Image: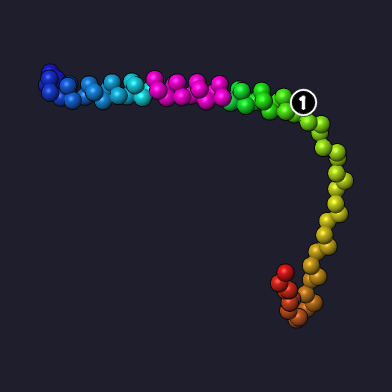
Amino acid sequence: MVRPRAAAARQPQEVNLAEMVVNLQRRLEDQEREMLNLREQLAQQNQEIPPPPAVPAQPAAPAAPAAQAGQPVIRQEP
């Protein structure tokens, strides 16, 4: 048998947990609505702004010279 005092002590926590669940569900729904609105705004902006022109690929920078056998590589600070 559950003691009345223990049951009374648990009840407020259960109410708080239920309220927390409801509040979290509301926040989740609000965030989902906000995300949909932001997606719509982004899609609209993407339609308004033309895509940037294609940029030709830059050739790769030459690799640093390898050290010759027995000689240390001296690095220069930028």
Give the side of residue 26 with respect to residue 13, left or right.
right
The residue that appears at 60% across and 22% down in the rendered structure is 36
Q: Nearest the camera: 5 or 38?
A: 38
Percent of width and height locating residue 66: 79, 71
Q: Which residue shows up at 56% across the image and 21% down it?
A: 33
> Which residue, as the protein is rendered here, is positioned at the far bottom?
70
Query: Observer-nearest residue: 69 or 9?
Result: 9
State whether residue 62 is above or below residue 3: below
* Residue 63 vertical position relative to residue 19 in the rendered view, above or below: below
> Which residue occupies 36% across, 24% down?
20
* Closer-to-camera residue (40/3): 40
Label 1: few (<14), some (14–19) or many (≥20) C-alpha neighbours in 10 Å: few
* Quadrant including the N terminus: top left
Looking at the image, the residue that sits furthest to the top is 1
The boundaries of the magenta stretch are: 22-34
Residue 6 location, x and y as percent? 15, 24
Q: Quadrant of residue 60?
A: bottom right
Instruction: List x then y, in percent, for residue 11.
Output: 22, 21
State the image coordinates of residue 78 (x, y, percent, origin top left). 72, 69
Q: Is residue 28 magenta?
A: yes
What kind of secondary structure does the magenta stretch mostly adopt? helix
Which one is nearer the viewer's eye here, 63 or 22?
22
User: Left of 25 or right of it: where is 69?
Assistant: right
> In this rendering, would 37 be left or right of 78?
left
The count of marks equals 1
Q: Is residue 4 magenta?
A: no
Q: Secondary structure at mark 1?
A: helix
Residue placed under numbered mark 1 in the picture: 47
Q: Residue at x 58, y 26 (%)?
A: 35
Q: Amino acid at mark 1?
A: Gln
